[in-house]
Every structure is written in structure tokens, then in C-alpha cells.
Amino acid sequence: MYIGRAPSTSANLGSGFDVVAVAHDAYYAEAYASVGSGCGVHVKFKGYDPGPDNTVARAFRRLFETLGVCRYVEIVVENKIPVARGLGSSGAASVAAIAAFLEEAGLRVDPRVVVEAAGYGEAAAAGSPHYDNAAGAALGGAVVITSLSPLDLVKFSPRLTFVVGVPDVPPLKSKTKAMREVLPRAVEFSTYVRQIARVSALVSGLARSDPALVARGMADEVVEPARTKFVPAYDRARRYALEAGALGFCISGAGPSVLALVEERDADAVKEAIARAYAEEGIRAEVKVASTTE
Ligand code: HSE
């Protein structure tokens, strides 16, 4: 049986809210699909139960709507990506499940159709669709959403090294939705211009595989300041990571995980620094070195 597989992702990378994501080899989601006759989607999640209206079921409904077909499919998702940690677990589960289904059903579709369906499914967890995590999980590398409607995107393949800090804290209820509700409704025009410069640095850095330029784009004065108070040990982890040589630091997706961009030679020192920050605040956490993955 074919196993659909999709990697963890970090969306936003600071200034690229909802339009930039990187795929990394920190964790993976896997899924199996059995296709039968008739019409209907049944999804089982090994180890947790997000209920019937989950991201994967919604993604399939959207996929069938877009393709104008309905098939009977049973999906089993084995998600090794920590759930509700800002690591794209739900988008990766949908992408892995759709990949397994397409293979079993002998169908080929444009990757944008998969991203659109998986991003649409994200509304089950986030309150509204967003495509960044799903795009990273489906295409790998670094993905930039260049149009939301119709959905379009560009993929780059930078070689970047990260340290991912994943705190073991109880997730907030409807975490992504809550983290989107705290965002500012408006920004000053001068802030908007500074933010465009950062996003430009981010995208240029991803295109050129230039870590210093990516790090400049990881600064953010719109989304991240509204969220840091919900991210355990954010200030200390950021300070220690930068002191240990990290080039950039940001919240991974909607948090509570954090992401440091590092030169490979500094990865262990930054990993140790972030682990120390969590330990000093009494927070259990997994801290991993990860690389961009295809
Ligand atoms: N771009 C989304 C957000 C990612 O930050 O809300 C959610 O995982």
C-alpha cells in the first residue's frame, strides 16, 4: 500500500504572514488510503481524534468539489508532527492523505489543486482557509503564495538550517483561530512600507538561498508582536538563540513553537541555548536541528 508522506512546516517566517512557508525534516505525517466504490470520506487519526469535522475530511470535500468527482475513501492518518504546535501538522496530514488517495485512485492533479484543498481544510482548525503550511507540505522547499484567488505559488529550494523549539504545554483551545483573532486589524502606512521591505528580503533570501537575507525578513512588526505573549519562553529563547549565533528567530506558524535560522556550524550551540531557555522557565520542550527538505 502506498504511504502518503508530508513534512512539518514553519509558516510565516516572521514577515511572510500567510504567504511564506518552509518545509523541514523535523517531523513527518503519513497516511494510507483505501478507495472503494461509492462516495464518502472516512478519516481515522492514530493517537488522537479531532472529531468528524476535521481538516482532512474538509480537504477531501473540497478536492472532490474541485475535481467534480466523489469517491469512497477510507483514510488512516499517522501524524508524527506534534499537533497544535505551529508546525503545520493539519496541513501535512491533509497533503499526505490526498497524496495517498490520488496514488490509490490512479489520479494526477496539479499540485495547486492539492494545496487549495488542503488549505481550505485548514478552516476547520483556523476559522478561515490559509495555504502556507499546506503549500510547504505539498511542494517542499520554500514556498511563496503569489496569489490567493486564484491560488498560485512559487517554489524555491534553499538549503537552510534551523533549530526548532517545541514546548510541551497544553495547546490553547482552537489555537490557530485564537492566534488569528489577536492580530491587528489595521497598520500604519509607514509600518506597511517597512514590512514590504522585510517580505522582499525574505523572498529574495529564499530565492538566492542567502541565510542573512532570509534572517532580515524574519523580523516582523505586525503579526509577531501580537502573539509573543502566548509563546512560552519567547523572549528568553530569542535572546539566548541570538547570543549563541542564530541569524534570525521567529514564531513557527501561529506558535507556540519557535524557529531559529542558523549557520550549520552554530546549530548545536543554538539548540543548547534554546533548550536552556525553556529549562530556566520550567517548560518541558523538544528542541531539534532541522534542514529544509524537498
Ligand atoms: N499563517 C498561519 C498563521 C499559519 O500564522 O495563522 C498557521 O499555522
Image (cartoon, helix red, strand yellow):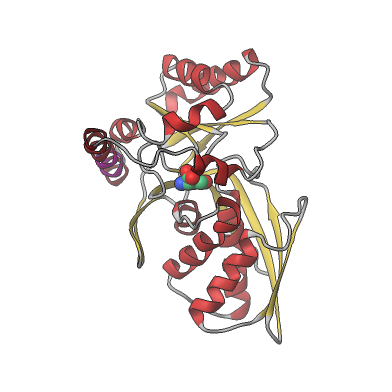
At horizontal 64% and vertical 82% (from top left) the residue drawn is 71
With respect to residue 221, does 116 lie above or below? Answer: below
Q: Position of residue 33 (x, y in %)?
A: 68, 70
Prevailing secondary structure class for the magenta stretch in the rendered image = helix
Would residue 9 be visible to someone looking at this image?
A: no
Residue 255 or residue 25, whichever sits in front: 255
Please identify the quadrant where the N terminus is shown. bottom right
Viewer can see residue 202 = yes
Q: Is residue 40 above or below residue 151?
A: below
Task: Give whichever of 119, 165 is nearer the camera.
Answer: 119
Q: Nearer the viewer, residue 60 or 22?
A: 60
Q: Is residue 277 above or below residue 214?
A: above
Where residue 52 sits, quadrant-wise, is bottom right
Q: Which residue is drawn at the image coordinates 67% and 47% (left, top)?
A: 80
Expressed as whole percent of the image width and height from the top left, the position of residue 106 reads 57, 80
Of all residues shown, which one is farthest toward the bottom?
Answer: 37
Magenta span of residues: 199-204
Q: Residue at x 51, y 54 (%)?
A: 137
